[in-house]
Image (spheres, helix red, strand yellow):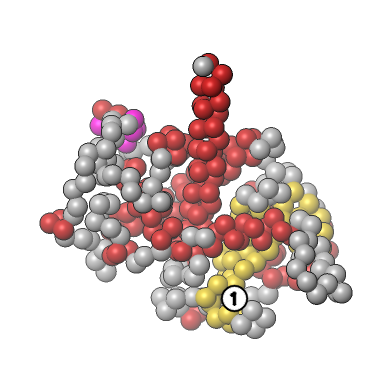
Amino acid sequence: MPFYLAADDRVQPAAAPAVACRCCPGGISRSTRARCYPSDMSEAEWALCEPLLPAPAWLAGKGGRPAAYCMRDIVDGIRYLTHNGPVWRALPADFPPAWTVYWRAAKWQADGSTETMHHQLRERVRLLAGRKAVPTAAVIDSQSVRAAEEVARSSRGYDAGKKVQGRKRHIAVDTIGLLLTVLVTAASVQDRDAAKPLLWNLRKAFPSVKLAWADGGYAGKLVTWAKTALKLTVQIVRRPDDLHTFEVLPRRWVVERTLAWITRHRRTVRDYERLPAHHETYIYWSMIMVMTRRLARKAASTAASDQSDVA
């Protein structure tokens, strides 16, 4: 399946200012792209992401040669696809070839680099918010999304409650809405059934988490199982039976807001991936974009405050 674009069709934008880049020879970015898309990283965002990317093999003396394209352009290509959701062949021509960006995204997924970068950014956001780097409580929920025709019948299902044919993503977030872990299943899988592997992964990755809030769909045997098998307390936040209008429910609104953050990115509005693990990766990328922007805004406001104090 070719993902390349013709070299003659490639746009040659005006040269961008030289910035530091570990992946490029001489430490100076070779990127010549003009930053023109909403998903493009600012200098502050690139300064956050670049040290978290895997070091090139040639830089560590393990052989090979420098990549043909600056890693900043690769990351911007992945962010563009996550934010705008086109097919790979529709990646704009000012990015590296679509197959190059696709291969790098798949490689970082396979070796865990995407998830590692996400976790390190989450710790920074938590510290910035005055929290400890490692959470002690979580909120879980699920969301059913329609699946594109690329999704095989064996990995999709029908959610009768939401009337959705596709897949379901189960997530656990901390108390400020930052993603802790995600699990993608067929939409026909019940929340209580998928919650067991979700909570198992949560407990394994974050032994400090002792309490998890959930809605009424998780009530029943799951609460006893979590307490016995994981030493984890699952507290059910129920919706009042006599409630007929919208009301923000304690704790539950946090995870619902995170699901809204994720669906702001068009690649995650539906499930376009053949493998559930690929969809999980783009959920991580959507949260990486949310967190880098938050950290960059804070850095910019701090710098502006310092300059006003000096003046």
Res. 198 visible in picture: no
Residue 120 picture quarter: top right
Amino acid tagged 1: Ala
Res. 6 visible in picture: yes
Q: Nearer the viewer, residue 105 or 297?
A: 297
Is 75 in the magenta? no
**Image spot of residue 127 (x, y percent):** 64, 35
- On the rendered structure, is 26 left or right of 159? left
Q: Nearer the viewer, residue 18 or 54?
A: 18
- On the rendered structure, is 227 left or right of 260? right
Magenta part mainly helix, strand or loop?
loop
Residue identifier under label 1? 187
The span shown in magenta is 20-25
Q: Residue at x 22, y 61 (%)?
A: 4
**Badge 1, how many Cα within 10 Å: few under 14, some, many 20+?**
many
- On the rendered structure, is 274 left or right of 305? left
Check disc 1 and report its element: helix, strand or loop: loop
**Image spot of residue 287 (x, y percent):** 53, 52
